[in-house]
Image (cartoon, rainbow, N blue to C red):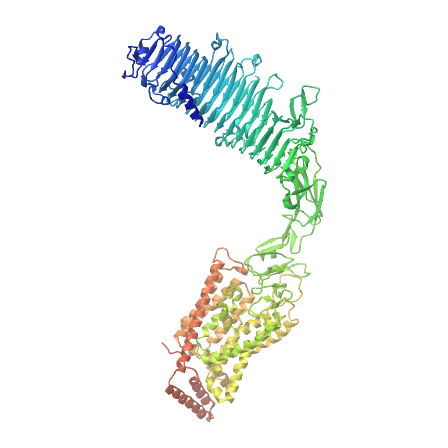
Amino acid sequence: MSFIGIILLFATAVCFFPASGQEKIYYVHPNGDQSGCPLDGSDCYTLNEYFAVFTEEEEEGAIFRLLPGNHYLNNSIDISLSSNVTFHGMTGETNPLDFPVVIRCTAENVTIKFESCNNVQFQNLMVRNCGKRFASKDDFYESALVMLNVSNAKIVCVSIQDGPGAALALIDSLNISISYSSFYFNNRNSTYNESTSVAVFYFTAQAGNNSDTNPMKFEMLRSNITNDKAIGLHIQLIQVKSLLDIRFESIYIANNGFLNILLFSVTDNYDLSITTLRSTASQYGFMVSQNKAQNDLDFSRMPFINITDCFFTGNGIVILWSTSLSGLFYLGHSTFSHNTGIIGSALLIATDRNPTIEGSFDITLHNVTFDSNTLSAELLDYDHRIAATVGVSNGRNLSIINCTFSNNRGSGLGIFNTYATFYGVNNFINNSADIGGGILMISTSYLFFTPGSLVNFTGNHATNKGGAVNVEQVVLLFTAVDYFFSQSDVIINPCFYGLEDKNLAEKHLYFQGNTAEIAGSVLYGGDTGVCTQAGFSEISTFVDQEDTFSIISSDPRGVCFCRKGPDANVITNCSQKTLSMSAVPGGSAKFSVVVIGQDENATTGIISVSINKGEHSVNYSHYTMHLSTKCTDLTQVVQVQHNSTTKVTVNVTIGNFETNFFQHPLTVDVDINPCLTGTYLSPVSHVCECESYIKDASTECNGVNATVTKEGIHGWIGNYKNCNSTVVYYLCPYDYCIQSSVNYSLDDPNKQCALNRSGLLCTQCNEGLSLMLGSNKCGECTNDYLSLIIPFSLAGIALVILIIVLNITVTVGTINGLLFFANVVKIFQPILLGTDNTPVLSQFIAWINLDLGIETCFFDGMNACAKIGLQFVFPFYLWLLILLIIVLSGRFSKLSQLIGNNAVPVLCTLLLLSYTKLLRTVISIFIYPALSTTCFDHLVWYYNGEPYLSSCHLILFLIGLPVLVFLISPYILFLLFFPLWEKCRSKWRFGTKLYLKLKPVFDAYAGPHTDTFRFWPGILLVARVIIAIALVTTTSIRIISISVAVIAILLVTLSFGSVYKNKIIHMLDVCYLMLLLIIFYIIAGTIGDQGHLRTHAITRSGAKIGIIIMLLLGFLGFFCIMAYHVYTFCKLRCGSDKCSGVKKIKNSTSLHNIAAVSSNDDPQAVLESFVDVSNQLREPLLESI
């Protein structure tokens, strides 16, 4: 059954017991309703009618029996100097708990007052809307029910509700009993902050003029006080000459705005007993304010406050003992749960005692549970470091017996200048606070453990220090007691705890799973080293206290070197005072230190670090820093002013104001090493910095450890072999170096190499690896791959057959623009942002340039020399095939018929296909880098980093030079200047035989072009040369500029006239040139000068997408060209026999004409006839539109 239900049950049995005595009985009927009046003729009027005419003699011994109903009261009732006055409500047949008799005030300031009366009873009534609105303390005299100087009054089963002011005022009244009553929602319109629902005041000595020899009493039993605007029950004790016994039993008091119960006293003549009180939902629950009288030393007795079997939630108890008056406070068998506050959120006891004056306030907490109390949200700005669930200040004797402090936010127990004694088993479980999760001790506080006592600390936590216990001071001042030996009444004990028993080995403290985020998971503060009676560890049991390095700690006492052990444990070495190490200027002297407290355990504190910058320096720097309890890694940057400085000293000490303990400083001696290769000692920063040419070639350079960071930079930077300076070259060979962000040391430059490469300019393969075909990657290869010679050979034959069968020749002209597009793209491969690795598109570009396009091994040990030498093999092999076919065609008529008129055009096509490949190969043989170093007295070949013209490079040079002189250069000159030779034939007739031999070859190239632009194939060759040479001789942005200029000139030329006889071929060339122009624009928007990536232009990913789209369009053009040639081939194959006959007649006629003309001795006639025949022998071009 609930607490309120019990009260109501008693109310049913007690409240409505009829009043005794039949003298002067007056019946009171509700206004206008006399139906309930007795029929024997007894008086029966309304309250207003009675008290309009009553005299004091009539009031004496009067019993007013109020019939059920609403009794409207228009005027105040004032009864004085009367005895044995009773107001009794008749119950009728309804439920008595419904208060059938209601006195309802209908006018303002209407009260019911008893003054100087004796033996007053007020029962079985509900009073509503009575009293005066509370505006000042004087308004207590006009409460709904007032008893002034009344003796022996009983208020039973009364409910006073909805009053504008106070419900009940008992002023200087003696022996008052209130039972089974309720006071609800009063002071609803009050403006006075100290307004109260029930006021009990003893103002004058008149209260002591009591002829009764028994002690005076005030009691409230089984009653409720709820929902008052400010204070529920207010008791003031100003002058009370006789002992006043105040007793509360089974009281429910809740939801009052400020305070549930307030006891204010300046006297010692009272005792207070509270039993089974339930207090909830107010800012404060129960407050006792004992203040100083005129002379505290006149107090002769000790007030006793006894609180048992109570429950406080939402608020707690506050005892403010601001006097030297002695007192006893007992709190037993009670529960405090979910109360809020800061210092003493559940219980706060603050005394103002002087230890030199006799008197004490003794406190006993017996079997009390403090659970889930927390900090007040309204006091968040308060200093949370001293937040506590139970706070006791200046408590002379605090006894704690079998109590539990659990799940509280704030220290379980906080004591200030308090001597606490533990009896039995006390538990501090899962409390959390800023400092001292379990117990917080401040100033001269002291703990005493009786025999058999045990204090259990489990799972407490401190966000700062002292997970279980925090002691703010270690020197305590208190009065001597029997178990301490002293010559005087006041002694100084350096230990914060003491024992009474002789068995010093008994365990009084149990610690399990307590934690602190900073220091002292079990104990912080308190000098355990001076506890001579029994060591702290001797009386304690530790279980699952993981932070073994800072279980017991204190404020700083020194600083030690340390290191991190297994599981991040800290291992100190306080015996070591000096460390030695070395560093370059700007380097770091790294060491680990920890601030230590008592027992050399970790704590927090401020250290002072000073640095002497060398024996030749007058500079001396100093700084301080705060350390945690962990082993802290310190990094001291070493700065020197002169290259001659050989040593720097770092001193570490505890902060000057952190401790009184003296300690010699820790010393770190740093030997100074010279700056690394590629760096120098800066006279400005006094540290090693990178050389300027290295900074210019890198994204970021760290001169201290000689490391560089490159991002989007294609250059090579590093120290090479025994070179005493750093090698820098701005353009690494294509994809040899990592183009994304890379950080590495200058002494380990191989980390910037891609594709398993190493060495100078990343030109070598890593040890045991071989260079692969189809890419620049190095991999593990075997000689088994030499069998690829067979498919390579077959591929050459297949290419020749494909060109012959589909007539894909330069003479037709469909592939001329495509070849130029593919050749330029291949030349631009180093700056195409990696798009050359796109599947299908990369093979498309590679195959048109006679490259393999597929990554594969060839033989074990292949290097750059072998790979570049192999580039000559396939073009020469193709030439050999077509020349062999031409020779065999003259010997075998069937072969001649199969090849038809395509032998020379096919040869010309293969020469043009091979031209760019040979040009790139020859340039790769001749190129050398201009390295920014003095380490080399010779040139270095660009593609293998070896001396120029040495070993295999010499062989390649001897091959490449003839190819350049006797093949590439004549080929360019032939196509460029042969048209001029044609025009000059009318004036100069030299070299006619040579001219006649070269004429069919040139006509094969010039066949698609108009007579005005027969030089166009030569112009395109020159354009290829310009772009290829620009790529290896200038920076990326200049390459783009030159290339754009070349393409622009070609486009402008094409716009002035028709270069090709066929408009479709003309437009096809324009399209391919436009694709190249767009690719150049994309690249220019992505990279800047010297290959650096731009940050505010086209993004690299966006540029890749754009280039891939252009390549895809080029591939689609190639696909259309191939489709056209396949269509033409099928059409010819499917032609009629008549068409075949016509072709035979044409062929025979042509041969006959050649024979006829040949008999003529005039060479000019022969030439003209040959030109006419050669034009007939050529394949027909596309029909003009």
Can residue 979 be seen at all in this image of the molecule?
no
Closer-to-camera residue (403/379): 403
The vertical placement of 985 against 492, above or below, is below
- Name the foreground residue: 432 vs 789: 432
Q: Is 979 situated left or right of 474 in this image?
A: left
Residue 539 visible, this orientation: yes
- Identify the image quadrant of residue 36: top left
Q: Is residue 752 left or right of residue 7?
A: right
* Quadrant occupied by the C terminus: bottom left
Q: Quadrant of residue 744?
A: bottom right
Where residue 316 appears, as percent x and y from the top left, is 50, 26
Q: Position of residue 1098 (x, y in %)?
A: 47, 58
All told, the count of numbered labels is 0
- The image shows residue 948 at horizontal and vertical percentages of 64, 69
Q: Give the image location of residue 629, x and y in percent.
A: 62, 39
Q: Is residue 323 above or below residue 593?
A: above
Left or right: 1013 in relation to 44: right
Q: Residue furthest top?
A: 57
Picture quarter with the N terminus: top left
* Residue 122 drawn above or below residue 809: above
Front residue (pair 350, 1111)? 350
